[in-house]
Image (tube, rainbow, N blue to C red):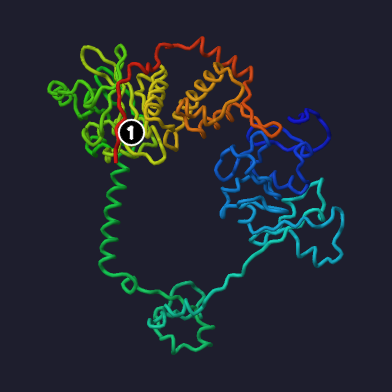
Amino acid sequence: MSCKFCEADSNEEQIQCATCKGMCHPSCLELPKHIIPVVRTYDWQCNDCKYCYGCHDIENEKQILFCDRCDRGYHMYCIKPKMKKKPKGDWFCPVCTSENVIIKTGLKRGRPLKDKSLSNQFKPQNINGNDLTNQFKSDNINGSDLTIETVTQPQHTNLNDTTQKYDNSDLQIIRETDSCDDSPPEKVVKESVSETTDSQVKSSKITPEIPVEHIVSKTDINLFEAAKKKMEILLAIDKDMSPQEDGIKTIRMGDLEMEAWYKSQYPLEFNKCSKLHICEFCFDYSKTETIYKRHMAKCSFRNPPGEEIYRKDKLSVFEVDGQKATKYCQNLCLLAKLFLDHKTLWMDVGPFLFYIMTFNDETGCHIIGYFSKEKVSFLNYNVSCILIMPNYMKKGYGQMLIEFSYLLSQKEGKTGSPERPLSDLGLMSYRKYWEEKLLQYLLEYSEDQITIKGLSEIMSIHPSDIVSTLQFLGMLKYWKGKHLILLRKEIIDEYTTKAKSRENKDRVIDPVCLVWTPKVFK
């Protein structure tokens, strides 16, 4: 395979970038020979894909220092303590220094050590004393090119600290018997430490056992026993809620029946039902169809108990405060838990706002999906949890909800990002949205220069999400000391083809239809 920089296929051994999978000649990158064996031990990145290992940012390239052992890069302000200027001579990154390994490159290449004892002294070893000679073995490097010295500190144990614990207490001494079996002796002799001689200690097997009552109080023991019993009850309940045993198999909402994907934290008596009846307006749940019909006849809900902030044709979005409509939001979270395996919050809904998308007809507002977000997010997360009901999946509503969340962030004058970790389906949906928005904007952009910060401010997408998307598409390159965004033809053609053949083109968010003022929470 040819080198991605010189595009030549020589006999020189190449190294592969873990991000773009491109092959590179070390000579094209001006890498010293002693670094080549080390970069093969981790996910090394080429100059096009390299970023700071401390903050994972590609900006401020002039502030990045490269390790003289492993070629990792760090901003000078990401190192602790921070560095104000570049050091003279060799510099080693925090990863290499944490391994207690010092690289000595002062020896001339090809010059053997005269004293054999010195060669054994500098034999590659790790902290545990294991030989690392095979790890750094390579045809392009001999034993005198690289010398690794392991620096270890002896561990001093203060024996007085261990003996002082038992100065005022008796130790139980179990003496060895002449019998060959492993059964314990019938009699146990208790002796004081002061009465035990050195010869007795050498010929005895000491097993100190301190009663629990001598260490903790009775109150702590009672609290522990009570917590243990409570946990056993909770584990038994959790076992009963397992979908493989007696969990909820299907749910009924209106005229639809849907299979439950995961277990939810419904009360135990409801979790033992194979089929659960749920009101499609207030999400109240019933065990039998009779109770469900009686509830539907009396239910006063026909739309979410919040403020309608968006309406276009038959599509609406309601903003519901978890503090004001606690029961409604808790029921919604219990319903969402049936289709989300990573969702854990369902009781404490007060700190969250819920944005519920509905389809409206003469009978009421039927839920399509929803997303929630924190009222006050210190990390500027604009989505905490997002769900599209199974009967509305793969119809474009997921992209609409994501676009709506970024529209709210734009109204707030912030850059938003979904809360991590993302589920597999969530990551696919968000990556699809980021790709479409970036490609659409870059194709319409007429200037030659652009910044990641500028893109972030325009689209309200966090800079890290923009960088990760560009790297995923292979569009972010590094050439002659500059970072470039490469609009590859195959990516543009693929995007254009998908845009033309896309179904449900009318399912987009219209900012004009949004009537909303950001709320300020303390």
Amino acid residing under circle 1 = Lys
Task: Give left or right: position of 320 versus 473.
Answer: left
Q: At x 66% / y 41%, what residue is drawn? A: 44
**Residue at point 87% right, 53% down?**
110
The residue pinned by badge 1 equals 337
Q: Position of residue 174 (x, y in %)?
A: 44, 79
Name of the residue lying farthest toward the top: 500
Q: Depth check: 118 or 487 in front?
A: 487
Badge 1 marks a residue whose secondary structure is helix
**At 28% across and 65% down in the image, what residue appears?**
220
Q: Position of residue 447 (x, y in %)?
A: 59, 20
57 or 501: nearer the viewer: 57
Decide if residue 317 is on the left or right side of residue 200.
left
- Above or below 339: residue 45: below
The answer to whether any part of residue 248 appears in the image is no
Kindly tell me whether residue 195 is visible in this rendering. Answer: yes
Name the residue nearer the viewer: 107 or 82. 82
Q: Where is residue 119 in the image (x, y as percent from the top left)?
A: 80, 63
* Residue neighbourhood size for the residue with mark 1, other residues' Cα within 10 Å, grouped as few (<14), some (14–19), many (≥20): many
Q: Is residue 222 above or below residue 448?
A: below
| Left or right: 8, with 395 as reference point | right
* Residue 438 percent across, percent down from the top left: 52, 23
